[in-house]
Amino acid sequence: MNTLRKAVSLVLLVAFCASSAFAAGAQEQVETGGTLNVYSIMPEKYATTIFEEFTNDTGIEVNFVRLSSGEALARIIAEKGNPQVDVLWGGPADTYEAGILEDVFAQYVPSESQEIPARFRSPDGYWTGIGVIPLTFMSNTAFLEEKGLEPPTSWNDLLDPAYRNSLQMADARTSGTATERIYSLVQALGEDQAFEYQKKLHQNIQLYTKGGAGGAMPVATGQAGAGIFYIVDALDIQQQGYDLQISYPKEGVTYGVEAAGIIKGAKNLSAAKRMMDWASTERLGQVMVENRINYIPTRPDVTVTNPALDMSKVTLLEADASWKGENRSRFVERWIDEVVQQ
């Protein structure tokens, strides 16, 4: 009997040691590798490059699905009881502010957060800014010449009958670029005047696209004459060799703060924190600059080399992310009721 007890004890001891070793190995994997699941509002071509560099630096593999901002927020809210991803990557900060109201983001202050100006991060640690992207007008040069137009330098220029059925821009029901357009107009013109303007602008719209960059290629190829985009998308198309004009309204534009944040209840929390720490460092900004991903880094110590990202002569209008988040749904509903369904 004593022999049997010793044998059982030995088996249990071996099992215990094996399980301890496995646990230690699992912990080591979290620290040096692992897997992270992400919804990316940032376009796939940019996110793929950035995530590959993150994996090279940390060993953490990233699985991601690309969604527009409206789709991503709706899905995260729907999955609130059982989150399917750990991080939301990219998209304007007002999307995150709207999500905070739905209690879907976790608080976490990344390791180098203090190096990012306060206006580019959540004061409560719900999101961290990774890039700044002003709105811009983008026009097809051949279209302008055909119509005898100069590149638009006022919001009112886009009301010209010459643009009838020639403008493509994003749909506010699905796109953060479109909600940024509304914020810009409200800041530049006042709220009621902004919606009156959009009713007039609607007469010149050829198509509202699901995603913010959806109209960029049609403008580039001459299927549309012009549109309103974030600078990162306009420059991406221009860099592909298309003859385009980028200009800004004298009344001013707001800018998006491209953000990232951890989902509340994230199943891979350690890896999610690692991503946010990495995003707060100079490294992310350097990756964007080196790969011509034209977000203006939120880290002021990252040197931007593209002169098109010099905003010193552009009238940038300030619109706090919390204000955007609080008004986002109301503005979208008003846009649907007064503009699209007029």
Image (cartoon, rainbow, N blue to C red):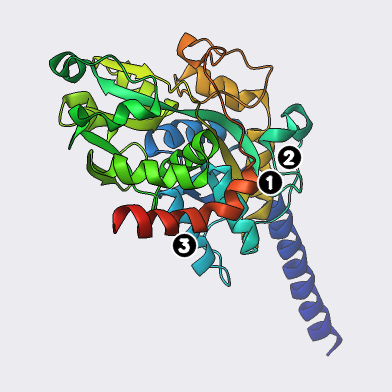
**Badge 3 amino acid:** Arg
State the residue lying farthest toward the right: 2
Q: Is residue 183 visible?
A: yes
Give the residue at x 18% y 35%. 164
Q: Is residue 183 above or below residue 304?
A: below
Q: Nearer the viewer, residue 36 or 200?
A: 200
- Per the model, the C-alpha gap separating discs 3 and 2 is 25 Å
Rendered view: 239 above or below 105: above
* Amino acid on which the number 1 mark rests in the picture: Lys
Q: CA distance from mark 1 to mark 2?
A: 7 Å
- Res. 93 image quadrant: top right
Q: Residues within 10 Å of mark 3 (few under 14, many from 20)?
A: some
Q: Which residue is mark 3?
A: 75
- Give the residue number, with chain letter if any, for mark 2: 110
Could you tell me which quadrant the N terminus lies in? bottom right
Contact (CB < 8 A) between labels 1 and 2?
A: yes
Q: Which residue is mark 1?
A: 273
Q: Is residue 136 left or right of residue 209?
A: right
Do the numbered discs 1 and 3 sit on residues whose CB atoms are within 8 Å?
Answer: no
Q: Are marks 3 and 2 in contact (CB under 8 Å)?
A: no
**Where's residue 278, x and y in %?**
65, 34
Q: Position of residue 238 (x, y in %)?
A: 31, 18
Q: Residue 321 appears at what percent x and percent y? A: 62, 43
Image quarter where the C terminus lies is: bottom left
Q: Is tag 1's residue or tag 2's residue first in the polypeptide sequence?
A: 2
- In this view, 323 is above or below 131: below
Helix, strand, or loop for circle 3?
helix
